[in-house]
Amino acid sequence: MDLIQSIREAGIVGAGGAGFPTHVKLASKAEYVILNGAECEPLLRVDQQLIVKFAEQIIEGLEKVAELVEAKKVYIGIKAKHKEEALFLKEKLKGNSIVELFELDDFYPAGDEQALVNEVTKRVVPEAGIPLKVGCIVTNVETVLNIMESLSGKAVTHTYLTITGKVSKPITLKLPIGITYREAVEIAGIKDTRGLVFIDGGPMMGKIKTNFDEPITKTTKGIIVLDEDHYLIRKKSMSTTMALKQSKAACLQCRMCTELCPRYLLGHNMQPHLMMRMSNYDHDNLNKAETASLCCECSVCELYACPAGLSPRLINIHYKQKLSEKGKRYAPSKVTFETLTSRDYRKIPVKRLIVKLGLKEYDVKAPMEEVEYFPQRVKISLKQHIGAPSVPVVEVGQRVSQGELIGEIPEKAMGARVHSSISGVVKEISNYIEIESI
């Protein structure tokens, strides 16, 4: 079986982002492959530990990916502050002419794939484009590990994630896909979730969740538990209606949201202050709003840049949705782009960002532990990826084994397969497949 086929059959998607199907991404040719080990979101500790624990498998996986896409070079991007990990990798890479370590500064968002491409290659991904446009393929640490597992016939049934925040035992674990967030946080010492909410992912781009009984997915990389009245939770809970009202009342057009916008600094025409201005004075003129489509929703404008504590991110999302409803797509005005000369001086220091977010007390280690967890029931989503939801290939009452296919990619659609994370009996099928252990 060839590599692409094994990746497809294993249901591998990007483990650190939106879940782009990996067999689709690696069907192209590229000059460079970049391993995204930056893990720029504060408090998350998955990649920096995986890259050491499974260094040999990951390096071998990168070599196989490079051969597949005919890349001439592979770069492993990790932050220079991880000195022990960097020294360890340098030792492992001695004599390797294909794979090279690239040490990154400690800034946010170093893990944004467009920022990472520029750091490593000095190339700028075009507006509304992907790294492949400049000869690069960016992949995640756990994704490469899953690729190596697929060569042994193992499907994606578990995910690595950091559980941190207001927990007694910050920890990084490998857990079955489909267990609840409640089960996960109990392992970290939380028995009573009253008065608590959590962020699925990092504090900047992660989504607030209030229902601890929802299931984790292939792309769950972090659970950050916080008090429901924490500053960050209140800020991220703001409605679009409130954001629009605050903008009209308090936006001074100081341009700080634009001056610190990572995409603007790459030379893109992403100017959040103009969206704020339009929301105040020309609300319905979508012809002036098309650049909102370039927003990557990194939250720099909302959680770091704005001196008035406003939410340009929500304004951008508001106009992105309106543009989508009207079928309007942004058309880049040029082909090549250059970073602003000020970019190097406007990178967001992560330590300063952590203080700004009110998370300093939670900036602690979350060591990886081997925990054998056998859930009584899992609820596995048929859509854990970009593209079409998977189609069930099992029936209620059917017995399935761990790793068995339960959801197939629809014909002529982009998607990813879904497999059972436990052995059991199928109890219910909807947008999820519920399986009870036997």
Image (cartoon, rainbow, N blue to C red):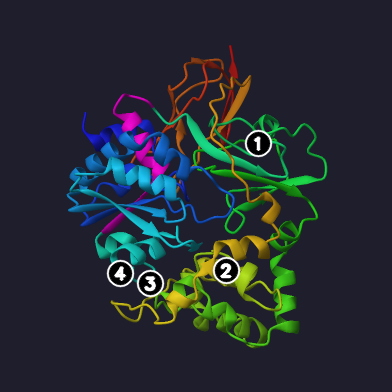
**Magenta segment:** 136-154
Q: Which residue is mark 2?
A: 300
Disc 3 marks a residue whose amino acid type is: Glu
For label 4, the SS is loop
Q: Sequence-wise, which precedes: disc 2 or disc 1?
A: 1
Disc 2 marks a residue whose amino acid type is: Val
Q: CA distance from mark 2 to mark 4?
A: 22 Å
Q: Which residue is mark 1?
A: 181
Q: Which residue is mark 3?
A: 127
Counting labels gives 4
Residue 89 position in % (x across, y down): 34, 44
Residue at point 58%, 11% (across, down) = 438
Residue 152 magenta-highlighted: yes
Q: Sequence-wise, which precedes: disc 4 or disc 3?
A: 4
Q: CA distance from mark 2 to mark 1?
A: 27 Å
Q: Which residue is mark 4?
A: 122
Q: Is residue 190 above or below residue 279?
A: above
For label 2, the SS is helix
Residue 362 position in % (x across, y down): 67, 50
Q: Residues within 10 Å of mark 4 (few under 14, many from 20)?
A: few
Q: CA distance from mark 3 to mark 1?
A: 36 Å
Quarter of the image where the N terminus is located: top left
Q: Is residue 387 visible?
A: no
Q: CA distance from mark 4 to mark 3?
A: 15 Å
